[in-house]
Image: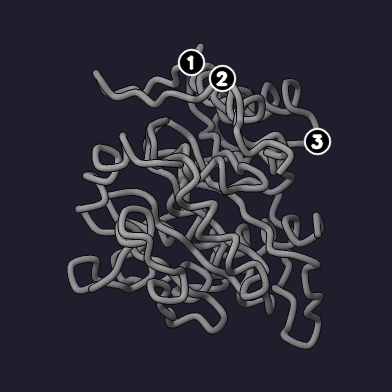
Amino acid sequence: MQEIWVLDEAPGAAVQLPATDSRASEGRPHTEPETKSDRRPATQVKIIAIANQKGGVGKTTTTVNLGAALAMAGRRVLVIDVDPQANTTSGLGVVPADQERTTYDLLVRGEAVSGVAIPTDVEGLHLIPAAPDLAGAEVELVDATGRERRLSDALNLVTSSYDYVLIDCPPSLGLLTLNALVAANSVLIPLQCEYYALEGIGHLLGTLRLVQDRLNPKLDIEGILLTMFDGRLNLSMQVADEARRHFGEKVYTTMIPRNVRLGEAPSFGKPITVYDPTCVGAVSYFNLAKEVLGHE
């Protein structure tokens, strides 16, 4: 059987996609989050993978803060940390080493979501934490049956428990990210406003096409989020213009600025929407949440 290879950036790391899917057919405007009374229940859970094979583009920052903003808008949100670095876990005030069950148990040992998810300090926001042992999951799953569908199968059992599931992917295109892409309805791609940013996104888009063709035909691009934007720099403006020229309406109106408070919040284990809800970084994520909610 012919196979398609999706290569990781790390030497020797690769994931094979089957040629056929055996289960186919299957400025800064001031805005505030919606209040609990404004809640509009989603018709079904929306699963969004937050992915980019490049590191340092704002995946974790976006997962933590978008998740918190959606929960503060009255949605039931589950954040899944699929990155062995576990920065999303610590960014929500959870110590990875203290957790008895993590994403590893979900993917490798077949634990149920309900047995792994834990509440956070933000009402309505739950977390499936990661830990460094997750790095071994890609090796252990290589010969496992349905290895690329482990996360999808687990989430199929919780469709009525949450309105949104946000999956923070590692900075690679290996088996962990593949699990997220197969499980997701859509992908949110953080794109830093820096040189070569658009070139770097090409590999990810190629992988998305392969996943759409072979494993998850419903996978769509949720949106392109411009991060680390600095309106004082011509480069930031040029990258933003180029992104909108290439991706049109898929680029969110909201842009995430460089912001000192955004950088401080993780060290306190709090989303920026809790740590400093009036700073420009928090307002930006509240605005992003409104755009995401507008797609319901």
Identify which residue is drawn at 57% across, 72% down: 278
Q: Is mark 1 on a helix, strand or loop?
A: strand
* Residue 222 percent across, percent down from the top left: 69, 43
> Residue 19 has which mark?
2
Q: Is residue 120 above or below residue 3?
A: below
CB atoms of marks 1 and 2 within 8 Å: yes
Residue type beneath disc 1: Glu
Q: In which quarter of the image is residue 142?
A: top left
Left or right position of 128 against 268:
right
Q: Residue at x 42, y 73 (%)?
A: 117
Q: What residue type is labelled 2?
A: Ala
Q: Mark 3 points at which residue?
A: 249
State the residue at coordinates (46%, 46%): 59
How many residues crowd around disc 1 within 10 Å: few (fewer than 14), some, or many (20 or more)? few
At x 49% / y 27%, what residue is drawn? Answer: 194
Count of all numbered marks drawn on residues in the image: 3
Residue 41, above or below 293: below
Disc 2 from disc 3: Cα separation: 32 Å
Residue 129 percent location from the top left of the image: 35, 65
Label for residue 188? none
Sequence-first tag of 2 and 3: 2
Q: Is mark 3 on a helix, strand or loop?
A: helix
Q: Give the image location of residue 241, x and y in percent.
A: 70, 25
Q: Can you tell which of label 2 and label 3 is closer to the viewer?
A: 2
Helix, strand, or loop for circle 2? loop
Res. 3 mark:
1
> Which part of the image, by quadrant, shows the C terminus?
bottom right
User: Is label 2 in contact with label 3 (beta carbons under 8 Å)?
Assistant: no
Is tag 1's residue or tag 2's residue first in the polypeptide sequence?
Answer: 1
Q: In this view, does 86 lie to the left or right of 190?
A: left
Q: Where is residue 215 in the image (x, y as percent from the top left)?
A: 60, 33
